[in-house]
Image (cartoon, rainbow, N blue to C red):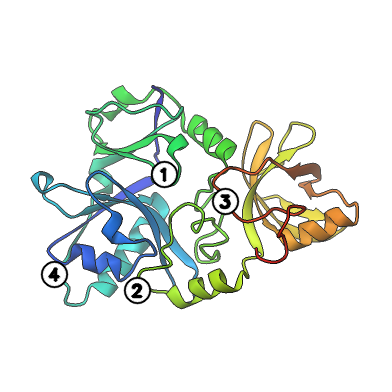
């Protein structure tokens, strides 16, 4: 077992008798599936369908006081608290920022975490990512055996995006950040904020921009944030890099046109190509049957 502390994660508790319904009416995922044995992954959106924050939702059993813990990107914690308070209105819900007293750890190699590591849960996005845990910050260092870079390198190898690293909050739609591929969006639940835009993109197949894994031809990746282009035309942006690979936000229709014209995609001046498609991705890559019919 190799574990790392994710120092860029915060924790919010949502409790009270209306907690489940409160979240169900706000977030993209189906809260009925979130139980003490099964965490959820979802997001809060703007009315225009852009991601304000994505997070993990962990249900607490009655013996731990009930309610839910949100495993949240640290830099989004204060804004998410503010927005949750705004939507609270008369709901019987209590909101607490537990970030200072808490720590989030994650498996860096996919192996299970110790059962006593805190509130341990399987990463709901992809089984190969292993487990995460929310624990008291005091004494957590004894469990840490790996640097965060090890976790992110594995995440990149598996093709899993991270908010703030691979897509910008307030600028990306759930489809662009692959929430539709990773169980982060329910297309069967009732209304939530931004739901109409997300449903329209799903049914019309209009998600032309996607985060995809790429491999740099020379084995050395461009810097995160570098522009991706082909034939002098922009394709998108390079995100997290590790071991000559990266996650990149790309306009796949433009990439397909460039490849058809024999142009080489470049990121930060370095040539790259699409990596083998991860098994969890269901939309077609350029060159695959069905590409262009739906994105």
* For the residues bearing labels 4 and 2, Cβ distance under 8 angstroms: no
Task: Please tell me which of labels 3 and 4 falls first in the chain.
Answer: 4
Residue 150 to residue 280: above or below: above
Q: Secondary structure beneath disc 4? A: loop
Residue at 41%, 53% in the rendered image? 75
Furthest toward the left, the residue is: 63
Q: Earlier in the sequence, mark 4 or mark 1?
A: 1
Residue at (54% x, 55% y) in the render: 178
Badge 4 is on which residue?
92
Side of 267 where 78 appears, left or right: left
Q: Residues within 10 Å of mark 4 (few under 14, many from 20)?
A: few
The numbered dot on residue 190 is: 2
Residue behind mark 1: 8
**Residue where numbered disc 3 is placed:** 166
Q: Are marks 4 and 1 in contact (CB under 8 Å)?
A: no
Position of residue 100 measured from the top left corner of the image (x, y, whole percent)? 26, 45
- The Cα–Cα distance between marks 3 and 1, rounded to whole angstroms, is 14 Å
At 43% from the left edge and 61% from the top edge, which residue is drawn?
A: 185
Q: CA distance from mark 4 to mark 1?
A: 30 Å
Q: Residue at x 85, y 48 (%)?
A: 264
């Amino acid at each position: 077992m190799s574990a790392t502390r994710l120092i860029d994660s915060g924790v919010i508790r949502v409790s009270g008798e209306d907690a489940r319904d409160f979240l169900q009416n706000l977030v993209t995922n189906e809260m009925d599936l979130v139980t003490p044995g099964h965490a959820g992954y979802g997001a809060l959106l703007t009315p225009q369908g852009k991601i304000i924050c994505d997070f993990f939702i962990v249900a607490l059993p009655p013996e731990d006081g009930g309610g839910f813990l949100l495993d949240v990107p640290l830099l989004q914690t204060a804004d998410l608290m503010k927005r949750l308070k705004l939507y609270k209105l008369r709901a019987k819900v209590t909101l607490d920022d537990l970030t200072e007293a808490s720590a989030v750890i994650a498996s860096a190699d996919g192996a299970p975490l110790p059962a006593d590591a805190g509130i341990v849960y399987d990463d709901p996005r992809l089984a190969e990512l292993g487990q995460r845990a929310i624990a008291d910050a005091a004494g957590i260092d004894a469990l840490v055996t790996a640097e965060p870079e090890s976790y992110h390198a594995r995440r990149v190898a598996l093709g899993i995006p991270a908010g703030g690293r691979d897509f910008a909050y307030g600028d990306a739609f759930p489809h662009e950040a692959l929430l539709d591929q990773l169980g982060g969006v329910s297309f069967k639940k009732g209304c939530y904020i931004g739901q109409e835009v997300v449903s329209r993109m799903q049914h019309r197949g209009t998600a032309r921009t996607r985060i995809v894994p790429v491999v740099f031809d020379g084995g050395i990746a461009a810097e995160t944030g570098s522009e991706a282009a082909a034939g002098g035309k922009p394709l998108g942006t390079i995100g997290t890099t590790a071991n000559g690979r990266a996650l990149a936000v790309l306009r796949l229709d433009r990439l397909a046109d460039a490849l058809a014209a024999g142009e080489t995609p470049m990121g930060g001046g370095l040539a790259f190509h699409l990596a083998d498609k991860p098994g969890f991705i269901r939309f077609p890559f350029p060159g695959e049957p069905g590409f262009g019919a739906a994105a």
